[in-house]
Each structure stands twice: as structure tokens, then as C-alpha cells.
């Protein structure tokens, strides 16, 4: 424990970007240590795109390792600088100040209570992540009104012992949006999900939604726990292109999916209500799209979109993500797109496979393109001379 505290104090004193690994969770936090106390730390965190993403309190006993140097940290430093250079839209990050001589956990909870902040909690001996508003703080108990953005009928009140809280996220982009939206979310009524699952009806349903504003969700056949949220852009004979919305309600690029690979179209759900509200809030704050992305692309419904997207990506060496029929996902760029086949050059750990693998176009079930992570991978490869 002493060596971890020494590492944390070094990160604080030298203002070093670090990764903090936990003993019992796979979530890794990246950021700058702002406060160290004898029970825990405050880390000002960054998201995967290099944007400030609020902060986290971590109890000392859940910290497994503090990493000062790695390829991952080099990539994050590049992304943080790119986000500044390109003036990415950001939520604002950590604005609160803490006194290391007082209990950090209780300071965060008090701020959350007074400022009506939505927080995310992880408790000792509990695998759940709880999101909600702190509605009361006492010496040995706090009350949290849970917010379930997936199911409005499941929003109980929890009474917790503060000392049992091991992880406490606050002021992040998604949590901030939930805080702004909290009163409206509490007014929204629970709806039963409305799904179209009949393979005969899916193409017609998508055709009716094409070019319209409502957000819907697509559930893929192969992984029915997964879903894509967005607006239907265009429908062809065998495919659909969707303008995606990410979990903070911002434009998240495009995906083209084979109609045969769609298990269901979700027309109505509590989560869709949440995302519609997030999208509206982003629009009103001019936060709906990052400046390096383009959400106004139109696609020709008369051409094969898989061949067209692969050909365009090959021409410009654009990074895309493929989902193949065997269920595997690959990030990279295609080349030599022919009538039936193409070569795909995968990027793994920022290393580009210059030789590539040959695939059939019919092997590809989905192509994701024009989204922020792909832009950042591509930019880094170009800057480093690999692309």
C-alpha cells in the first residue's frame, strides 16, 4: 500500500498522466491525480477520445497499480492533444476542489447533494454500478435516488453506508447530461418496448423510418444483447445505413448493416426516450457533433453499399470497423476491392498490418465508419507515417 501511495503522490506532485488499475474491477481510469488523502484519491479523468470526463473518487484499498508509462498512455496523450488542437466539444471536466485533510468520500457526497449532481457508485462486495442523485447525507448513512435510463419503472431509493462506497464517479459528460435531464427524466413515463421482429416486416419498417427524425434501435441477429441507436439514413435492397447516436446523445458516425442480420427494430423504449432527451439537450447547447465529423452524408440506395463503402475507404485509406459473419470485429482499412473480394489491413495496438488478409465482400455483415475513434486512430497513424 505504501508504494501505491508513493506513486500517487509522485503523480500528483509531477502532474503526470497515469492509468489507475483496480483490484476488483476491469475499468481502468486515465487522468491526473488532483488530491491524495489517507483513505482515497480524486482523479480528474479523460474519456477514450481524450476529452475531460469529470472525476472519480477511488478508495485506496481498491487501487491495484498506478501506471506511468505505456503505449496506451502515449496514445491517450496524443488524443488529449488532438482534442485540444481540434477544439473538440467537451463537458467541462472537474470543477470542484477538495481538502485532503478531510474525508474525500464525504466531501464528494456533500457536493453531489448540494449541487444535485448525478453520481455513479460502486459498493464493496457488490458488482453493480449504481447511478443516481444523492438526496440525503447523514453521519452514517446516505440516500440515493437511483436513475435507470433503461427502465423507468425500476428507480428505487437506496440507503447506503458511505464507508462501503469504493468508487464514486461525478461530473462526467454522461452523468452531467443525466443531471441536467434528471427532473425531465423523472417526469417521463415508463413505456413498454415496441419491437418489430418479423423478418418480413423489418425492411418495410426501416423504409418508413428512412430520412425521418425519430431515434430507433437496431438489434443484430448475432449478438442480441447489443443494439445501435440512431436515425435511419437510407435502405437498399439488402442493407440499411444508420446515423448513429452515442451514449451521450452526440452523433456517433455511421453503420451499414445487412437486413438479414437484423434481429429487431426497436421503435419505442425507455432508453430511446432517454437518448431523445440527451439529443435535444445537445442540440440546444450546440453540442450535437464533434467538429471533425460529418453527419450530413447522403447515400445512393440503388448501389451495393458494402462494395461502395469499402471502395471509398480503400481510395482514401480511411479507417473503418468491420464485423464479419464469423462474429469477429476488425479495425483497419481495405485495399484492392474487386468484384467479390478485398484485402483488409488490420490495426491492432496501433500497429498496421501492411500485408493484409483477403476476405469476401459477402463475409462482411456490418461496416462502421465516419466516427470519432476511427478518426483518431487514422490521424495518429498518419502523423506517425504508417498510413
Image: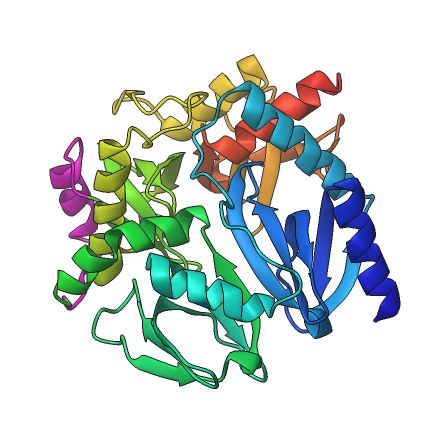
Applied colour scheme? rainbow
207 in the magenta segment: yes
Q: Image point 32% across, 43% down: which residue?
A: 249
With respect to residue 67, does 91 lie above or below? above
Given residues 257 and 237, the one toward you in this image is 257
In the picture, the quarter occupied by the C terminus is top right
Most extreme residue toward the right is 3
140 in the magenta segment: no
Q: Image point 81% across, 63% down: which residue?
A: 5
Number of labels in the image equals 0
> Is residue 376 among what the camera can see?
yes
Q: Quadrant of residue 197?
A: bottom left
In the picture, the quarter occupied by the N terminus is bottom right
> Is residue 237 among what the camera can see?
no
Given residues 191 and 306, the one toward you in this image is 191
Q: Which residues are magenta?
A: 191-214
Q: Image point 37% across, 45% down: which residue?
A: 248
Residue 66: where, in percent of width, then height?
Answer: 78, 56
Residue 64: where, in percent of width, then height?
Answer: 76, 67
Most extreme residue toward the top is 315
Q: Is residue 35 left or right of residue 213?
A: right
With respect to residue 131, does 18 lie above or below? above
Residue 220: where, in percent of width, then height?
Answer: 37, 54
Given residues 19 and 344, the one toward you in this image is 19
Q: Is residue 56 left or right of residue 367?
A: right
With respect to residue 368, does 292 lie above or below? above
Q: Image point 65% across, 50% down: which residue?
A: 34
Residue 28: where, in percent of width, then height?
Answer: 65, 57
Amino acid at each position: 500500500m505504501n508504494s501505491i501511495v508513493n506513486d500517487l503522490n509522485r503523480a500528483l506532485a509531477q502532474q503526470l498522466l497515469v492509468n489507475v488499475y483496480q483490484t476488483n474491477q476491469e475499468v481502468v481510469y486515465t487522468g491526473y491525480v488532483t488530491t491524495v488523502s489517507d483513505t482515497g484519491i480524486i482523479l480528474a479523468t479523460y474519456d477514450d477520445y481524450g476529452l475531460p470526463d469529470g472525476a472519480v473518487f477511488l478508495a485506496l484499498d481498491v487501487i491495484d497499480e498506478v501506471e506511468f508509462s505505456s503505449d496506451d498512455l502515449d496514445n491517450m496523450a496524443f488524443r488529449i492533444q488532438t482534442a485540444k488542437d481540434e477544439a473538440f466539444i467537451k463537458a467541462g471536466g472537474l470543477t470542484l476542489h477538495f481538502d485532503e485533510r478531510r474525508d474525500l468520500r464525504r466531501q464528494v457526497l456533500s457536493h453531489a447533494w448540494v449541487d444535485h449532481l448525478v453520481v455513479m457508485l460502486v459498493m464493496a462486495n457488490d458488482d453493480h454500478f449504481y447511478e443516481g442523485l444523492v438526496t440525503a447525507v447523514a453521519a452514517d448513512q446516505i440516500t440515493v435516488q437511483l436513475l435507470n435510463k433503461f427502465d423507468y419503472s425500476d428507480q428505487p431509493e437506496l440507503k447506503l453506508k458511505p464507508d462501503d462506497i469504493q468508487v464514486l464517479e461525478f461530473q462526467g459528460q454522461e452523468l452531467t447530461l443525466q443531471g441536467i435531464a434528471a427532473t425531465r427524466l423523472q417526469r417521463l413515463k415508463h413505456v413498454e418496448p415496441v419491437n418489430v421482429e418479423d423478418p418480413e416486416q423489418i425492411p418495410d419498417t426501416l423504409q418508413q423510418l428512412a430520412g425521418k427524425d425519430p431515434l430507433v434501435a437496431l438489434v443484430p441477429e448475432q449478438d442480441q444483447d447489443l443494439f445501435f441507436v440512431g436515425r435511419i439514413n437510407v435502405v437498399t435492397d439488402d442493407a440499411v445505413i444508420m446515423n448513429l447516436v452515442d451514449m451521450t446523445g452526440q452523433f456517433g458516425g455511421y453503420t451499414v448493416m445487412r437486413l438479414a442480420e437484423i434481429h429487431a427494430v426497436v421503435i419505442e423504449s425507455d432508453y430511446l426516450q432517454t437518448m431523445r432527451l440527451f439529443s435535444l439537450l445537445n442540440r440546444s447547447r450546440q453540442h450535437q457533433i464533434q467538429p471533425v465529423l460529418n453527419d450530413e452524408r447522403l447515400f445512393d440506395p440503388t448501389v451495393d453499399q458494402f462494395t461502395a463503402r469499402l471502395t471509398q475507404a480503400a481510395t482514401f485509406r480511411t479507417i473503418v470497423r468491420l464485423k464479419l459473419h464469423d462474429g469477429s470485429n476488425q479495425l483497419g482499412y481495405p485495399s484492392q476491392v474487386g468484384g467479390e473480394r478485398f484485402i483488409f489491413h488490420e490495426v491492432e495496438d496501433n500497429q498496421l498490418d501492411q500485408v493484409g488478409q483477403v476476405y469476401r465482400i459477402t463475409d462482411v455483415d456490418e461496416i462502421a465508419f465516419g466516427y470519432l475513434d476511427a478518426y483518431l486512430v487514422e490521424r495518429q497513424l498518419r502523423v506517425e507515417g504508417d498510413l
